[in-house]
């Protein structure tokens, strides 16, 4: 997690600098200062810094990974990388509800009344997939 932490924390000052340059650039135009864009770039910098801080805190709690070692071999990272549900249909239901939700922006907001409950049902089904039925633990 060390390289990810460094990338995010080192990337945050870039956005803060870009916000300053953007504010100066828009202030020098005839229309005057444009605060919304400056605030948005500052918030992106804050989000990047927040992700870096989360990764730094997580890196303290877990063991060192092969990616963090300079003398690691490719074979050190072999093995299981997580638990995945190969026969799950819930990601398809989540994608369909997201598609209907995005379609609501183009067609009409009333479609969100279809997409939102569908997304909640699909998300609950995906989260609790291993809690009941054939794959229950």
Image (spheres, grey):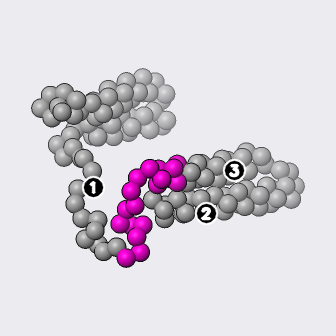
Q: How much space separates mark 2 and mark 1, taking CA atoms?
A: 28 Å
Q: Answer above or below: position of 72 versus 65.
A: below
Compared across the picture, whether 95 is left or right of 79 comes to right
Q: Earlier in the sequence, mark 1 or mark 3?
A: 3
Q: Quadrant of residue 116?
A: top left
Q: Earlier in the sequence, mark 2 or mark 3?
A: 2
Residues rendered magenta in the picture: 54-71
- In the rendered image, residue 58 lying in the magenta stretch gets the answer yes
Residue 10 is labelled as: 2
Q: Answer above or below: position of 78 versus 42.
A: below
Q: Are marks 2 and 1 in contact (CB under 8 Å)?
A: no
At a point 42% along the width and 34% down the height, the residue shown is 101
Residue 81 is labelled as: 1
Q: Main secondary structure of the magenta part?
A: helix
Element marked by disc 1 = loop
Compared across the picture, whether 43 is left or right of 71 comes to right
Residue 42 is labelled as: 3
Task: Specify whether residue 120 is in view.
Answer: yes
Compared across the picture, whether 115 is left or right of 7 comes to left
């Amino acid at each position: 997690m060390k390289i990810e932490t460094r990338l995010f924390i080192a990337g945050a000052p870039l956005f803060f600098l870009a916000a300053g340059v953007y504010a100066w650039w828009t202030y020098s135009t005839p229309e005057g200062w444009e605060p919304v864009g400056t605030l948005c770039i500052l918030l992106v910098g804050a989000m990047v810094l927040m992700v870096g801080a989360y990764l730094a805190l997580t890196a303290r709690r877990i063991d060192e990974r092969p990616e963090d070692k300079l003398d690691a071999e490719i074979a050190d990272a072999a093995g299981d990388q997580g638990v995945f549900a190969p026969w799950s249909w819930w990601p398809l239901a989540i994608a369909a509800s997201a598609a209907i939700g995005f379609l609501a922006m183009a067609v009409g907001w009333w479609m969100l009344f279809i997409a939102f409950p569908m997304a909640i049902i699909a998300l609950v089904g995906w989260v609790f997939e291993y809690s009941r039925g054939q794959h229950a633990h």
